[in-house]
Amino acid sequence: MKNWRYGILLLFFMTLGNFCFAQYKESDWAKRDTWMKVNELMKLAQVDQGSAVADIGCHEGYLSIRLANEVGNLGKVYAVDVRQDRLDRLDEHLKDRKLTHVQTVLGDYNNPKLPLGQLDSVIIMDTYHEMESYMTILEHVKKALKPGGHILILEKLKKHMRDKSRDEQTDAHTLSSQYVKAELEEAGFTISEEIANFGNWKNEKDKQMWILVATLPE
């Protein structure tokens, strides 16, 4: 009986885990394109042909691969994640697509391990709320950007969490732009673009996406 119960519990948590990360799997990318305005996002981050850009929290590479197509062979994409299994799957996707200008990077929770002074843009999409050492991360991003470079942060804010503290929000895997704006400014960035409503995450009305773009002073 105990073995039977253990098996049921194991199956439940495996299924739950797959459900939680389904939005990041390649099989879901086409559906994600219907609500994630990637081309507009890249324009906001000023990603062009030949750009050097980092995707921090890349998972299996949904954004990294689209960035690679945008920057072309003369550009460079650094795809950063803290889990090697995700990077291994991304490496497979890159091999299948013959994309050789994407470098996967196994980062630490407090250091994305980016090259110093080489990046035009850094994008952190639906990941910043997971960062406990966010000010340390921002310092590393500053060191990785060229003068005048850009950081774009996209997050979703659940409506029922709007008036909660930062800790309460991040515990619920959500975050308000007001906290992040203050943190970017404290880190020495200049806010250049603020979009309060970038659409709804997975078309769910309770999860409104927002974007902040900030510039590293020259």
Image: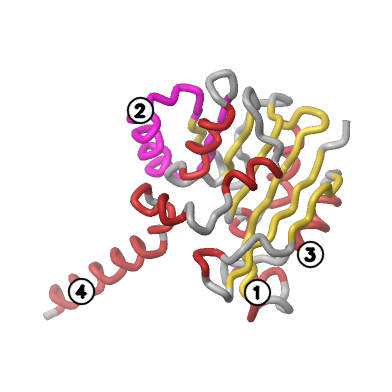
Q: Secondary structure at mark 2?
A: helix
Q: Is residue 92 magenta?
A: yes
Which residue bears the numbered disc 1?
A: 168
Could you tell me how far apart the alpha carbons at marks 4 and 1 are, in whole angstroms? Answer: 31 Å
Residue pictured at 18% horizontal, 70% vertical: 7
Look at label 3 and name its amino acid.
Answer: Gln
* Mark 1 or mark 3: whose residue is earlier in sequence: 1
| Above or below 88: residue 72 | above
**Residue appearing at x 20%, y 74% in the figure:** 8
Residue 6 in the image: state x and y as whole percent: 20, 73
Tell me the residue that label 2 is attached to: 95
In this picture, residue 210 sits left or right of residue 183? left
Disc 2 and disc 1: Cα gap in Å? Answer: 40 Å
Name which residue type carries label 4.
Ile
Q: Secondary structure at mark 3?
A: helix
Callout in the foreground (4, 2):
2
Task: Please state the horizontal and vertical placement of residue 88, each as a whole percent of the image.
Answer: 37, 37
Instruction: Please give the label number shown on residue 60.
Output: none
Between 161 and 111, the one nearer to me in the picture: 161
